[in-house]
Image: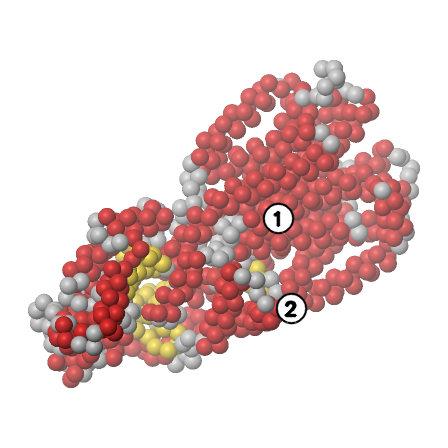
């Protein structure tokens, strides 16, 4: 079968090279034309778990309590915060922001109602709301109120009164929200039962509309944020300003991805051209590999645009990876072609190319398949960007294999005369021969070293964690980092966490019993307390009454005293402020009913609706967690809150719900361990099976997998020993390392088996392998290592770690293959073979 395939290959590709290249160009033009539809995605949804039930609850709570999208501007004036010139500049800033079409309102110290400057009563509220801009306002009283108010302190003004925050609330987009709700509704329906044909078509149509509209909206937001930054720039002469908030992070992340795609592409391109010229020193060995690399990347850009896949921060390095992997395939072909000059001297170009393809086709196919398996193992993850990254690379590598065995041989056929490269300084030969001598004379030491490294790796892996701070994903020079740090330090934290507490289930049982009595006895209402009827919501709800104020205060105080939390807002905050309005007198149910009915709408919207449901049977404690806290342990904190509320404050477990981006992000982090184990397990089992099929030997399969497991294990172990946590990028290192590193292993073992058949001398076969295929292994490994180091140009720290540790893993794998693999092949011979 192999011979028949080679005949067809020779008849189609080698005898019609120009036609082959033209057909490939036509395919590239057709698919590449869709590259205009290529888009980036850095939304928060792109970093969430697939089918996370907490996400469904999170969206429900957001719809109930409102969750307008907003930006935060921190403003630290050079003059006193309450100086006239500062307030005038602040007003100009707010007015400029309000001129933007998508800005609905701006909340600042200028606009919020003041109730303690001087102290107001409930009756005074009907006479109008005082603000900082009210004529003849007492600035000293205002300063005191912002410093002591349970609502405003560390929310609008920092403790040192040198920084204030402006909340820029953006207008909601009804079209986006409608499409999102329709899509999510159909997706949830699909999880419970198969969709009908009509619903499946509808889901596909709505998803397409949502994706298209999301791209338009993202572009609008990026333009708005650019305008906001322009406005901020005009006020930097008066103080220091930083921009924060999810929309800003999304916009900047897209810029990071765009920068990474450009920087990685150009960086890898320059590096690859330089490496090819330095190593092979002939134009054809630069032109042909680069044409193959370009073709692979162009195809993938077009393919991603064709099917509507967006590139996220996780997959932003797919261009550099694809370039490196394509080049490694070409390098093995170049080295084999060069070897054929000595093996079949005087052969014509057709013979050389045909023999090159014949000898390298099978190992190259297997190396591509093992790499595809490594990336396909990422499909076992629950994180959508990781899954998409796996698909992108699996498809890209498949095309890279086809393109390398189409364009490269066809291109060679257009060159009539064979050419051999001779390195000016044979550094490669020196290194590979040194490794061969090491294996020959230091076998026991080699085994001892790698055994020790394996033990150290296991110790390090046992120390791996998934606890990492979002702020550490960015360089300290970026505005994201600086803004988050300032807000964390001065304005009450950054990451939102909501503690939702329902009414006691017994309360609903009692209410249901009352309803039954009322139906059975028309005079039953006479038996109920008349005060309850007069008390309105305070008489019919579980939480909004005088009996629960103490419980609310205890929960609020507990959450506020946690070292990991910053600002906490809740109904307890509201009750404290209402008591101030009630002349510091305790609030009874009648007072609460009056407050609830007669408060101005602006205060009701600020103090009641965000923290209590309309029926008063559910309350929301809004926390902001200090993400820059080095002692932050997300999962432990969530478990502690739930446990303490149950055991210390006697809240029933079924009443407590934790939600917010803090919870969703923690779910992603906690899934990393299982994802890591799953991906490594899948890669190990599938590659072992492929080794057994290819080599038809369990012995060779085990020998081949050992060096690659050690290289991946050493990198994970080093991360554990250095206390570098796993994140959405680094969880892919182990699987990718094994998948790419086994490429050299396959080429080496395949060549070793051929060399052993020549004279049966295992040691001599090892030396010949090091002097032939060992060179290709060195070239490809160095190319991959330096190629991955280019990822350090990223602004995204996980990408930098990914590049550094994957490069290190490939370096370890190269030496493991040139030493440990070779040694195991020599000492673990098949039965019946003489030592």
Helix, strand or loop under label 2: helix
| Relative to 177, residue 724 above or below | above
Picture quadrant where residue 343 is located: top right
Q: Measuring 57% from the left and 70% from the top, which residue is drawn there?
A: 199
Question: Percent x, y for residue 401?
Answer: 73, 49
Residue indicated by mark 2: 36
Question: Percent x, y for residue 433?
Answer: 69, 27
How would you rate the neighbour count of disc 2 (Cα within 10 Å): few for under 14, some for 14-19, many for 20 or more? few
Answer with left or right where residue 516 lies relative to residue 578.
right
> Looking at the figure, which quarter contains the C terminus?
top right
Answer with left or right where residue 786 lies relative to residue 340.
left
Disc with the residue nearer the chain's start (1 vs 2): 2
Whole-angstrom CA distance, mark 1 to mark 2, is 27 Å
Q: Measuring 52% from the left and 60% from the top, which residue is drawn there?
A: 191
On the question of residue 397 being in view, the answer is yes
Answer with left or right where residue 345 lies relative to residue 367.
right
| Relative to 640, residue 244 above or below | below
| Relative to 819, residue 69 above or below | below
Residue indicated by mark 1: 376
Question: Percent x, y for residue 783?
Answer: 65, 43
Q: Measuring 16% from the left and 80% from the top, which residue is drawn there?
A: 125
Question: Percent x, y for residue 11?
Answer: 90, 50
Residue nearest the viewer, comparing 783 with 109: 109
């Amino acid at each position: 079968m192999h011979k028949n395939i080679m005949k067809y290959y020779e008849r189609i590709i080698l005898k019609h090279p120009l036609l082959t290249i033209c057909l490939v160009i036509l395919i590239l033009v057709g698919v590449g034309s869709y590259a205009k539809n290529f888009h980036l995605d850095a939304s928060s949804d792109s970093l969430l778990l697939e089918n996370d039930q907490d996400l469904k609850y999170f969206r429900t709570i957001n719809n109930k309590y409102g969750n307008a999208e907003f930006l935060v501007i921190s403003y630290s004036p050079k003059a006193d915060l309450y100086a006239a010139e500062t307030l005038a500049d602040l007003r100009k800033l707010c007015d400029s922001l309000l001129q933007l079409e998508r800005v609905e309102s701006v909340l600042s110290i200028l606009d919020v109602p003041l109730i303690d400057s001087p102290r107001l009563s409930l009756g005074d509220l009907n006479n109008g709301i005082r603000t900082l801009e009210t004529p003849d306002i007492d600035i000293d009283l205002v300063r005191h109120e912002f410093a002591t108010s349970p609502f405003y302190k560390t929310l609008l003004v920092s403790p040192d009164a040198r920084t204030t925050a402006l909340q820029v609330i953006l207008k909601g987009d009804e079209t986006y929200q409608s499409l999102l709700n329709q899509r999510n509704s159909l997706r949830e329906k699909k999880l419970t039962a198969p969709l009908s044909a009509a619903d499946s078509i509808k889901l596909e149509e709505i998803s397409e509309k949502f994706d298209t509209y999301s791209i338009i909206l993202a572009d609008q937001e990026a333009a708005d944020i650019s305008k906001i930054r322009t406005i901020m720039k005009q006020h930097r002469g008066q103080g220091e300003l930083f921009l924060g908030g999810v929309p800003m992070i999304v916009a900047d992340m897209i810029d990071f991805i765009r920068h990474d795609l450009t920087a990685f592409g150009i960086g890898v391109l320059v590096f690859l051209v330089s490496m090819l010229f330095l190593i092979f020193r002939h134009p054809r060995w630069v032109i042909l590999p680069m044409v193959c690399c370009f073709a692979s990347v162009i195809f993938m850009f077009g393919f991603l645009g064709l099917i509507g896949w967006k590139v996220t921060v996780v997959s932003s390095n797919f261009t550099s990876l694809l370039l490196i992997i394509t080049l490694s395939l070409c390098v093995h072909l170049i080295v084999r072609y060069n070897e054929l000059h000595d093996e079949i001297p005087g052969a014509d170009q057709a013979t050389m190319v045909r023999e090159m393809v014949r000898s390298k086709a099978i190992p190259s196919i297997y190396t591509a398949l093992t790499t595809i398996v490594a990336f396909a193992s990422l499909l076992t993850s629950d994180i959508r960007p990781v899954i998409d990254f796996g698909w992108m690379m699996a498809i890209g590598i498949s095309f890279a294999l086809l393109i390398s065995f189409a364009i490269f041989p066809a291109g060679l056929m257009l060159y009539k005369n064979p050419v051999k490269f001779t390195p000016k300084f044979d550094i490669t030969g020196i290194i590979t021969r040194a490794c061969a001598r090491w294996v020959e004379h230091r076998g026991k030491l080699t085994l001892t070293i790698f055994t020790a490294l394996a033990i150290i790796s296991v110790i390090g892996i046992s120390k791996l964690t998934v606890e990492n701070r979002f702020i550490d994903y960015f360089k300290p020079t970026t505005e994201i980092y600086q803004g988050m740090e300032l807000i964390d330090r001065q304005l009450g934290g950054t990451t939102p966490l909501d503690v939702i507490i329902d009414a006691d289930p017994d309360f609903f049982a009692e209410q249901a019993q009352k309803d039954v009595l009322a139906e059975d006895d028309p005079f039953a209402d006479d038996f109920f307390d008349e005060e309850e009827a007069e008390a309105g919501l305070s008489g019919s709800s579980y939480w909004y009454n005088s009996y629960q104020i103490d419980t609310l205060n205890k929960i609020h105080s507990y959450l506020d005293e946690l070292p990991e939390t910053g600002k906490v807002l809740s109904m307890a905050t509201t009750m404290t402020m209402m008591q101030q309005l009630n002349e510091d007198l305790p609030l009874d149910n009648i007072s609460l009913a009056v407050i609830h009915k007669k408060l101005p709408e602006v205060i009701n919207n600020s103090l009641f609706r965000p923290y209590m449901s309309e029926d008063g049977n559910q309350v929301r404690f809004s926390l902001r967690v200090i993400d820059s806290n080095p002692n932050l342990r997300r999962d432990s904190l969530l478990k502690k809150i739930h446990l303490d509320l149950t055991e210390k404050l006697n809240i029933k477990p079924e009443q407590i719900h934790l939600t917010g981006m803090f919870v969703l992000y923690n779910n992603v982090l906690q899934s990393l361990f299982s994802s890591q184990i799953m991906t490594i397990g899948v890669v190990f089992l599938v590659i072992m099976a492929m080794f057994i099929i290819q080599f038809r030997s369990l012995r060779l399969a085990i020998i081949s997998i050992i060096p690659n497991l050690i290289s991946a294990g050493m990198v994970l172990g080093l991360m554990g020993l250095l206390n570098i946590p796993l994140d959405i990028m680094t969880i892919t290192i182990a699987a990718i390392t094994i998948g790419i590193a086994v490429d050299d292993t396959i080429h080496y073992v395949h060549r070793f088996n051929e060399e052993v058949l020549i004279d049966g001398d295992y040691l001599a076969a090892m030396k010949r392998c090091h002097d032939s295929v060992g060179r290709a292994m060195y070239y490809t490994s160095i190319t991959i290592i330096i190629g991955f180091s280019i990822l350090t140009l990223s602004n995204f720290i996980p990408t930098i770690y990914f590049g550094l540790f994957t490069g290190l893993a490939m370096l370890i794998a190269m030496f493991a293959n040139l030493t440990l693999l070779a040694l195991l092949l020599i000492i673990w011979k098949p039965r019946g073979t003489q030592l």
